[in-house]
Image (spheres, rainbow, N blue to C red):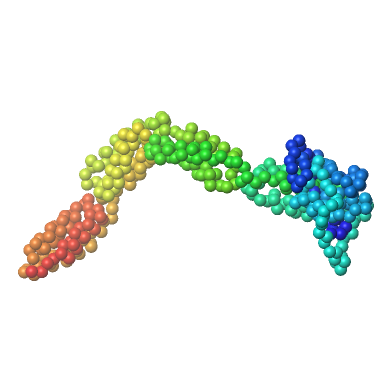
Amino acid sequence: MDDDSNLRHANKLTKILRSGTLTALCAGALFAVPTLARADDWQANSPDQIAGQISDPQTVYTIRSGDTLWGISEALKAKGTTLTPQQIAQLNSITNIDLIYAGNTLKFTGGKITVQPAQPSQPQPSQPSTGQVDKTALSAKIQEANKYLYTNGVYTKASLENLRIAVQRGNGVIKSDAASQQDIYNAIARISQAINGLQRISGQEVNKQPLEAKLQEANKYLYTNGVYTDASLEALQVAAQRGNGVIKSDAASQQDVNNAIARISQAINGLQKKSDQNVNKQPLEAKLQEANKYPQTNGVYTEASLETLQVAAQRGNGIIKSDAASQQDVNNAIARISQAINGLQKKSDQNVNKQPLEAKLQEANKYLQTNGVYTDASLEALQVAAQRGNGVIKSDAASQQDVNNAITRIDTAINGLQKQ
């Protein structure tokens, strides 16, 4: 890779981490195990600063906080040695050229490296002159960061917030006419560090067992019939449904689990027994007494409307006897009985059309006057149906339903006539 390629590599700054106290053996060299540095504390060293620390390219160089492989590569040119960042990484068995650690050592000689062939036919960018600021790399890094910022439920809020702050600072550098190339390098480094520090939610140790146990507890309450009020059971059901969603989610955090447990516990504690309420049943008792007066009026109301009232009254008596009935149950029972009373229909109130029944009786009489054609038993059945129909014709209290039923009985008897 040539010098211009090295410059392009500046767009991808190496992240520097402060060294810790532990040591480990890697690739045959003793190195310090790093601890993560805050982005606000880190600043990239310029090539001139690094060159001042390199006494001899033939000797081992100790990485300092703020060094990057690109900066080291540029510093080596001042010492008469040309090595690209990739070649330095290859010599020192570095797998990620964007990740080196303060306290580790680098060698610049003594190994076989792969040299990429030059391609003079392609135009190559030139290094910016003194005072010229290239923000292209920072813009690209911000675009890369934005991809992470819009991933929902993948990374923890804290690590995304750290990246968001770094991007905001980077945008400030983009907009600033006074920003230096060093500011650009630092902004890129902060964003790179924040990206590398993103923590996947699924990577956390999330213990869902307490939530599973709480859901089992909730289910015991949800299947108790008639003990708790509908409203309090509904609140528990909603909390349990949300808890099941957390159980199924691979992206759920421990905080999500804890919140779900808290919601279910709150709903369980809020369960209200129906018997715990001050239920006033006196209005229902009065309404039942009122309802009982109507069935005792013979021949005034239609059978269908009285049947509706009877059913409503029976349900009201059930509420009176129930210790688990709520005030809402009482109110509903009163409403049903009131509706049934208002729906009572007097037989005389109806416009009853008896003409179809009269016509049906005339038809029946024709059959009854035929001698020796139909069996006595089938004629007897028709005779009975016709007599009942005549009773409906004469009754002032007969309803339209009574008329329709009489017609049906006569039709059935006619269809049942059996020839001898």
Q: Position of residue 46 (x, y in %)?
A: 88, 47
The residue lying furthest to the left in this view is 372
Front-lying residue, 89 or 109: 109
Q: Is residue 182 left or right of residue 254?
A: right
Q: Going 72% across and 51% down the picture, which residue do you hit? A: 146
Decide: is 186 above or below 318.
below
Q: Residue at x 84, y 48 (%)?
A: 107
Q: Quadrant of the C terminus?
A: bottom left
Count of all numbered marks drawn on residues in the image? 0
Q: To which quarter of the image does residue 233 belong?
A: top left
x and y percentages locating residue 48 in the rendered image: 91, 47
Q: Quadrant of the N terminus?
A: bottom right
**Residue 118 in view of the camera:** yes
- Determine which quarter of the picture holds residue 8: bottom right
Picture coordinates of residue 387, whole percent (x, y): 13, 57
Q: Residue at x 70, y 49 (%)?
A: 149
- Look at the image and tell me whether residue 178 can be seen: no
Pick the front one: 167 or 84: 84
Side of 57 where 296 appears, left or right: left
The x and y percentages for residue 374 are 9, 67
- Choose between 268 and 68: the one closer to the eye: 68
**From what the image shows, is residue 415 above or below residue 276?**
below
User: Relative to 57, is 410 on the left or the right?
Assistant: left
Between 267 and 289, the one lying in front of the other is 267
